[in-house]
Image (cartoon, helix red, strand yellow):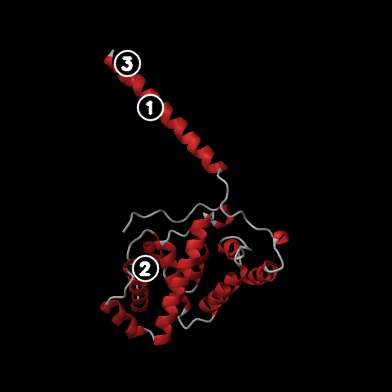
């Protein structure tokens, strides 16, 4: 008799959990978008010229963080100009610049940033082993000295909000003043981009499976 009661309770609990999961899935799929994707034909006279600038360089159209930036077009255009400098005119070598972006993408679990910048980082020469260690939340084991300097400076700023003497000394050995300033700027700017995308709950571009797992709190 006791065994039957236990089995019945297990079945009941299992059915209850299944119903709860089903309800959660329905709610998730029916959840209203916080910032519905703008379409070009919806844009006003202030937004349209900005969208034209975006479409000249964007591989994701006006989706992702651009969908948020267009909602504040003056701010968005100024941020876009900063991104143009930090992506294409920075004093930091491309391999290291993309590494700095990936570090913030990982810390913020920004699926959009990681999806967009992982292939760019690899193309620029960042070793896959370094990127893949970062992806799972490990300090990359095979970094070159300049990569380690980027990692330590970026992690200090993002997690401790200060730069240790050891990290600064390491950065000073391989970077100029301008490169250090540009490295700080790219990290801070891509934190802003991650904040925009995470607040909007942007999906992974192209409907792909999110590449990043949520890591335990540090």
Q: Earlier in the sequence, mark 1 or mark 3?
A: 3
Q: State the image quarter where residue 171 is shown.
A: bottom left
- Disc 1 is placed on an element classified as helix
Is residue 163 left or right of 121 when viewed as pictured? left
Q: Residues within 10 Å of mark 1 (few under 14, many from 20)?
A: few
- Disc 3 is placed on an element classified as helix
On the image, the x and y values in percent for residue 64 come to 57, 60
Name the disc covering residue 158, or none.
2
Quadrant into which the C terminus falls:
bottom left
Q: Residues within 10 Å of mark 3 (few under 14, many from 20)?
A: few
View extreme (top): residue: 1
User: Mark 1 and mark 2: span between their CA atoms?
Assistant: 43 Å
Q: Is residue 85 visible?
A: yes
Q: Is residue 152 above or below residue 201?
A: below
| Residue ID for mark 1 | 13
Q: Earlier in the sequence, mark 3 or mark 2?
A: 3
| Residue ID for mark 3 | 4
Asked if the residue under mark 2 is in contact with the one under mark 3, i.e. CB atoms within 8 Å, the reply is no
Residue sitting at x 51%, y 52%? 209
On the image, the x and y values in percent for residue 160 come to 31, 68
User: Mark 3 and mark 2: span between their CA atoms?
Assistant: 55 Å
């Amino acid at each position: 008799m006791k065994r039957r009661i236990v089995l019945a309770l297990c079945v009941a609990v299992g059915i209850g959990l299944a119903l709860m999961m089903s309800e959660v899935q329905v709610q998730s799929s029916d959840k209203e978008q916080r910032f519905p994707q703008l379409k070009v034909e919806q844009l006003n006279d202030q937004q349209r010229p900005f969208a034209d600038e975006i479409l000249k360089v964007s591989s994701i159209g006006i989706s992702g963080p651009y969908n948020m930036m267009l909602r504040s077009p003056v701010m968005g255009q100024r941020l876009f100009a900063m991104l143009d400098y930090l992506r294409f005119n920075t004093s930091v070598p491309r391999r290291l610049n993309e590494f700095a972006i990936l570090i913030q993408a990982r810390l913020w679990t920004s699926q959009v940033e990681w999806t967009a910048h992982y292939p760019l980082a690899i193309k620029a020469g960042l070793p896959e082993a370094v990127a893949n260690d970062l992806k799972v939340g490990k300090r990359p084991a095979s970094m070159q000295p300049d990569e380690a300097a980027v990692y330590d400076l970026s992690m200090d700023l993002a997690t401790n909000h200060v730069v240790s003497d050891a990290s600064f000394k390491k950065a000073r050995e391989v970077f100029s003043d301008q490169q250090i300033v540009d490295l700080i700027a790219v990290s801070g700017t891509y934190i802003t981009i991650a904040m925009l995308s995470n607040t909007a709950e942007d999906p992974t571009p192209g409907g792909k499976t999110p590449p990043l797992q949520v890591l335990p709190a540090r």
